[in-house]
Amino acid sequence: MTDGLEQLDVPAGSWLVLITTGPYAEAMQHLWRDACGQWFPASPWRTRPGPELLRTELHEDGTGDAELWLPIEPEPRSAVG
């Protein structure tokens, strides 16, 4: 392990991965809007404990690319429906 870095072991599981590109600030807002406002309400999944990962790449023209990784698990059957 490199000095100053720590290792985080992440158990295997399912992940929601959202990818966006466009004007940077707008693209970042769309990731969270799509996850919280559209994807989760329409799916039988919920977040689970674990790290939320965000990869961003900002371009000189003010646009950017981003990926948001959220750990997810199925909703308990009694909570669905």
Image (cartoon, rainbow, N blue to C red):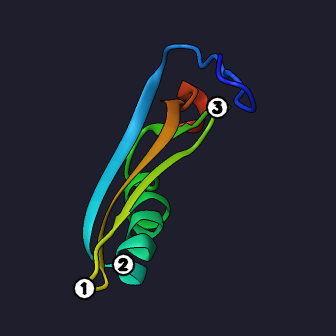
- Tell which circle, 3 or 1, labels the residue nearer the N-terminal end: 3
Q: Nearer the viewer, residue 6 or 17?
A: 6
Question: CA–CA distance between discs 2 and 3?
Answer: 26 Å
- Tell which circle, 2 or 3, labels the residue nearer the N-terminal end: 2
Q: Is residue 29 left or right of residue 1?
A: left
What secondary structure is found at the residue carrying circle 2?
A: helix
Q: Please rate how many residues cluster around mark 2, counting C-alpha atoms within 10 Å: few if below 14, some from 14 to 19, many from 20.
A: many
Establish if 20 lies above or below 59: above
To which residue does mark 2 refer? 24
Q: Nearer the viewer, residue 46 or 5?
A: 5
To which residue does mark 3 refer? 50
The outermost residue toward the front is 3
Q: Nearer the viewer, residue 14 or 5?
A: 5
To which residue does mark 1 refer? 61
Q: Please rate how many residues cluster around mark 3, counting C-alpha atoms within 10 Å: few if below 14, some from 14 to 19, many from 20.
A: few
For the N terminus, give its image quadrant. top right
Q: Is residue 65 visible?
A: yes
Q: Amino acid at mark 1?
A: Asp
What secondary structure is found at the residue carrying circle 3?
A: loop
Establish if 39 lies above or below 52: below
Q: Amino acid at mark 3?
A: Gly
Q: Please rate how many residues cluster around mark 1, counting C-alpha atoms within 10 Å: few if below 14, some from 14 to 19, many from 20.
A: few
- At 28% from the left edge and 55% from the top edge, which residue is drawn? 19
Q: Is residue 55 left or right of residue 2?
A: left
Q: Is residue 17 left or right of residue 21?
A: right
What secondary structure is found at the residue carrying circle 1?
A: loop
Q: Are marks 3 and 1 in contact (CB under 8 Å)?
A: no
Q: Where residue 13 appears, x then y in whole percent?
A: 48, 19
Q: Amino acid at mark 2?
A: Tyr
